[in-house]
Amino acid sequence: MQVRILGAHCIEAKGLNMSSILVDNVLALDAGGLTASLSFEEQQKIRAILLTHHHFDHSRDLITLAANCGMLSDPIKIYALSDTIETINSCLLDGRMYMDFSRYPSPEKPFLQMQTIEPFEAKVVEGYQVLPVPVNHAVSSVGFQVASNGKSLFYTGDTGPGLSECWEKTSPQLLLIEVSGPNKAEDFLVKVGHLSAQLLKQELIEFHRIKSYFPRVVVIHITPRYEDEIRQELQEASQELGVSIEMGYEGMNIDL
């Protein structure tokens, strides 16, 4: 399984993209930074997108991907919670600011084909075993375990603390997890459903208690203005736990 981080941040600037992961060039996890990171040819290879939730930094490039590829490649399936699909249809794909690609080129065969998922209901998506698991965020959200040929990852998307149920239901070799801000902002981060390095450390301790091992940990959804501070705090957590915790970055390639 080849994993490529297209967007490792929560905002966009030169060299920084919003949340998006690409698996084996065909399966995307979130769509915040798809098109800015990929050539037209690479975009046309994408066959399915798993959306953790509807927030703009995770869904924006549904529009740009469809605009770039809608007449050149086969339809793309979008897998998301019903609440996520409802919000995207009413706010992003409403046809008011741009074409509604959930109904174009025809309502019978649109380019973006919305597929409802349910928490804990496993699906086969493009040959991958996919399990959506609820996470704690400001809106309805899931993380995804993606498995193939004995390899697996778990991508949390945006999440706050309290991930015990995720650890009970999944067994990833690679954990792609967010840390959005520094430890000093912990109270605020908990309130809005995000993690700090200290909160991540607590979640990893719980993971080890339940699973008796640590996965490879790569952190994304980083706030750029706090990146140096977050990096230092992650290094301290890594040393305390005796486990590798890496900062993700745009263009990072991971082999599973």
Image: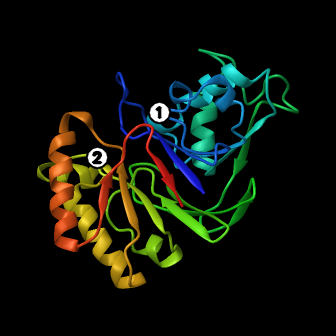
**Percent position of residue 252, x then y:** 43, 44
User: Is the residue under label 1 in contact with that under label 2 (CB below 8 Å)?
Assistant: no
**Percent position of residue 5, x then y:** 47, 43
| Circle 2: element type | loop
Quadrant occupied by the C terminus: bottom right
Assess disc 2: are there few (<14), some (14-19) or many (≥20) residues with their C-alpha within 10 Å of its C-alpha.
Answer: many
Q: Is residue 15 visible?
A: yes
The three-letter amino acid code for the residue at tag 1 is Phe
**Percent position of residue 3, x then y:** 54, 50
Of label 2 and label 1, which has the lower sequence position? 1
| Circle 1: element type | helix
Residue 168's place in the image compared with 195, above or below, is: below
Instruction: Say which residue appears at 71% left-offset and 36% top-offset.
Output: 45
Q: Is residue 140 visible?
A: no
Side (left or right) of 103 relative to 57: right
The three-letter amino acid code for the residue at tag 2 is Ser
In the current view of this chain or complex, which residue is farthest to the top?
97
**Percent position of residue 210, x then y:** 39, 83
Side (left or right) of 34 relative to 123: left
Label 2 and label 1: CA atoms lie apart by 15 Å
Assess disc 1: are there few (<14), some (14-19) or many (≥20) residues with their C-alpha within 10 Å of its C-alpha.
Answer: some
**Disc number lying in front (2 or 1):** 2
Quadrant occupied by the N terminus: bottom right
From the viewer's side, name the closer residue of 251 and 22.
251
From the viewer's side, name the closer residue of 183 and 215.
215
Residue 186's place in the image compared with 207, above or below, is: above
The residue labelled by disc 1 is 56
The residue labelled by disc 2 is 180
